[in-house]
Image (cartoon, rainbow, N blue to C red):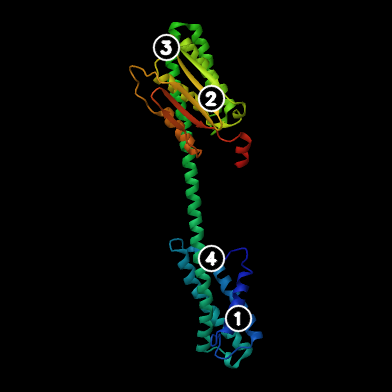
Amino acid sequence: MFSHRYKFIYPGLLGLYSFFNILILDGDRLFQAALPKNQLFPLIIILSYLVWFANYFIERNTLPLFKKVHPLAVQFLSSFVLITGLALISVKSTGSIFGGPFDLTKQNFLLTLGFLFRVNLFLNCVNAIYYFNKKFSEKNLEAEKLKLLSAEARLESLNTQLNPHFFFNNLSALSVLIHENIQVADSYLQKLSSIYRYMLNNKVNELITLKEELKFLYDYMDLLSIRFDQSLSFKVEIEEESKSKLIPPAVLQLLVENAVKHNYFTETEPLQVEIYTKGDYLTVSNPKQPKMAVEESTGIGLQNISERYRFLDHSIEILDGEKIFEVKLPLIGSYENTVSRR
């Protein structure tokens, strides 16, 4: 506190307060005899500055020497030693100038020391409040930084979680296609390469435009068409004004993959996945055609999407009805508005 940029103003204000305080409170003196006001005022101002800068000296030079002792204790005890010396010097100097009742006597010394002690105690109390408030602010700032780092690390973990989950399934499919039709497998591999490039480019992004995500989704749909031919179809209806809004990368791919994973479909009993926007939401829905032998779900897909939206202070809606499974995703602002908020 004593290194504050207003360190040349605060002691003057404190001295002014102390001067009027002595005038108002009868008997509160620096000496046994009353010092004339025109002499008392500059003396109090000088003493207030000396007490402040004595503490300033301690704060700058003494505290670093006692790192194992609480700084407030070092500050107060060291300042008490210095103000005792200041009281002695002050009374001796005043006595040599004015003489008589202002000479260095025990009573004059104790009165001046008492005044300096009150000023010093007040300053050290304010300093303690300033110290603890600063420490509290630093702790809060540190906690917020740790919270932010933790959130970023968690988000990075969620993003990297997508790749192994996605490519494990598709490399397994590619392995089957290689044995069945090498040309189809080559086309499949090119699509997979395009998708992988997209995921790498957007790995660090929290949000992308729906327009960009749809390009990726169409590539993924082509990938599924190679695998499942006519047994799987898609109906995509996106409002033009929704395309500039934002969603986390690869969430649509996860939802479509989830539909493929948990439902039975053939050319005679095809599965249609619908993707459409309405207002501030994008919906992915499919009829429930559960497989006879249901795979054990890892929960990665929906959990990943839910947690990524939670980091963005949004939540998804999952409607698991008797005949329809539906997930509603919030569309977050627009690109321009999001940038302006950051």
Which secondary structure, mark 3?
loop
In the figure, 114 relative to 155: above or below?
A: below
- From the viewer's perspective, is the residue at label 4 or at label 2 nearer? 2
Residue 64: tell me if it is visible.
no
Q: Are marks 1 and 2 in contact (CB under 8 Å)?
A: no
**Residue at which label 2 appears:** 276
Q: Are marks 1 and 4 in contact (CB under 8 Å)?
A: no
> What crowding class fits label 3: few (fewer than 14 Cα within 10 Å), some (14-19), or many (20 or more)?
few
- Give the camera-side residue of 200 and 91: 200
Q: Which of the numbered marks, if any, corresponds to residue 269?
A: 3
For the N terminus, which image quadrant? bottom right
Separation of marks 4 and 3 at Cα, in angstroms:
81 Å
> What crowding class fits label 1: few (fewer than 14 Cα within 10 Å), some (14-19), or many (20 or more)?
few
**Residue at which label 1 appears:** 20
For the C terminus, which image quadrant? top right
Task: Compare marks 2 and 3 and give the one earlier in the sequence.
Answer: 3
Task: Compare marks 1 and 2 and give the one earlier in the sequence.
Answer: 1
In the figure, 191 relative to 46: above or below?
A: above
Task: Compare marks 4 and 3 and give the one earlier in the sequence.
Answer: 4
